[in-house]
Amino acid sequence: MPFTGRKAMTRRHMLGAALAAGAAVPLATVAGPAWADPGAPAAPGSPAPAPTPTPAPTPAPIPARLTLPVPTGPYPVGTVQLHLVDRSRPDDIAGPGHFRELMATVWYPARDVERYPVAPWMPAGALTAFLADVGFSALADLAPFTSGHVGAPVLRSGRRLPVLVYAHGAHSHQGDHTTMVQELASHGYAVVTVAHTYDTYAEFPDGRIAVPSGDPKAPTAPRDFAADLRFLLDCVEQLAAGCNPDVDRRELPAGLLGGLDPHRMGAFGWSKGGSAAACATLEDERIRAGLSLDGPMEMNPPLSGELDRPFMMMTAVFTRAQDPAAAQFWSFLRGWRLNIQAQGAVHVSYGDNEALFPQVAKLLGWSGQQLQGTIGTLDPDEGVKIQQAYPLAFFDEHLRGHRRGHLLDGPSPAFPAVTFLP
């Protein structure tokens, strides 16, 4: 793995550890909620009740679906997939004549969404491979739906949409931060997420399923992710110019062509994707603002140079105090910069895990300690609100010139867990 000098953090490793910690109880024998009230105590002076046999635990009802938080923005959300090929980068793993092939998804504010179906969290084939790999196959039928309506027309309000590109982490998938992505879309952003082939789970239009590769020659380093992000910027420019970059020339939602603003683009990512966002922002001036969600900044060759555009770091494990590469990257920032940390957060706390794992914990009968061992001690409800509020405030200020109160100025009573690191 590309994170030299320490054990690599991958989504597969963390979910496997979570399963080992808490999922020893079979689904069919999960007991009801541990916080169920056993009954009020008898009134003073009343005779003690006769002992009654302890009933057998009642299996918890299997929910119809796990759920993701509903976006808080004023607009419904639309979504569409793109099948992309970067012909500037040969794919040596696939063989001669092949080029870097990617699946991407555009999320955007939509209109007239009623007749358009909502998208699943992951495509069915990719979901099956992902859950089998991490040991959660029993939850396949419970995977959540998103708030994105497939193919819904784009909301056009007279001005083109600012654009954000997103990179996932190692051995993860492009839906891993759907809560954050659809929140941004509901507030008027077009967000383009990418599945980094050879380090992800994805499904291509012809039915091929991509899974993480063990080939050491596979393009899975942070700089490879950064190159994917820069290619997405090229595709955004094509869409803005009225050209469809989808290699299969599939029909795009009404209003998408010509609807994106190539002069207001930002980048963000989680873990290795956060490192890639930093790398791409350093290298490409089209990115006007960058955000790293607990990204380790250690890569080969090391990051270098100065950055005069805004950058924010939301850290948990890879703090500047513990990660010299993160501290060095911070020293490169010559423009607006901010480093915040949610107390009690762990590496996975700024993504969909914060909403999904409390539901999984109830289903599998995990203790509170087992759940905290997976997502940390940060209150899950506050964790979700943090990932909805802070990225939006950052990109609003630096891509739209719109300040959301004083959220980025210092500690807020609305988010007591968030600390500002000098």
Image: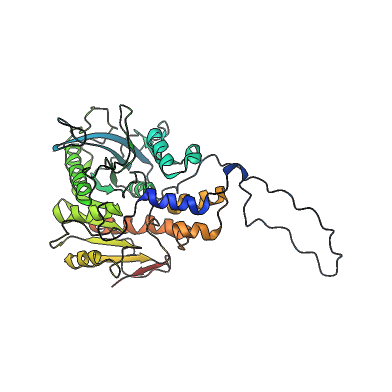
Q: Quadrant of the C terminus?
A: bottom left
Residue at 42% of width from left, 36% of height from top?
128
How many numbered badges does the structure rendering display?
Answer: 0
Q: Residue furthest right?
A: 47
Check the image and report above or below for 137 versus 359.
above
Residue at 20% of width from left, 47% of height from top?
224
Where residue 31 appears, x then y in whole percent? 63, 49
Left or right? Give the position of 53 relative to 380.
Answer: right
Left or right? Give the position of 2 relative to 371.
Answer: left
Q: What scheme was used to colour the molecule?
A: rainbow
Task: Residue 300: name its quadrant.
Answer: bottom left
Where residue 271 appears, x then y in whole percent? 31, 55
Judge whether residue 313 can be spotted in this image.
yes
Task: Residue 131: name its quadrant.
Answer: top left
Where residue 359 appears, x then y in whole percent? 52, 49
Left or right? Give the position of 147 relative to 340.
Answer: right
Check the image and report above or below for 380 versus 158.
below
Tell which of 339 and 73 is nearer to you. 339
Tell which of 90 and 206 is nearer to you. 90
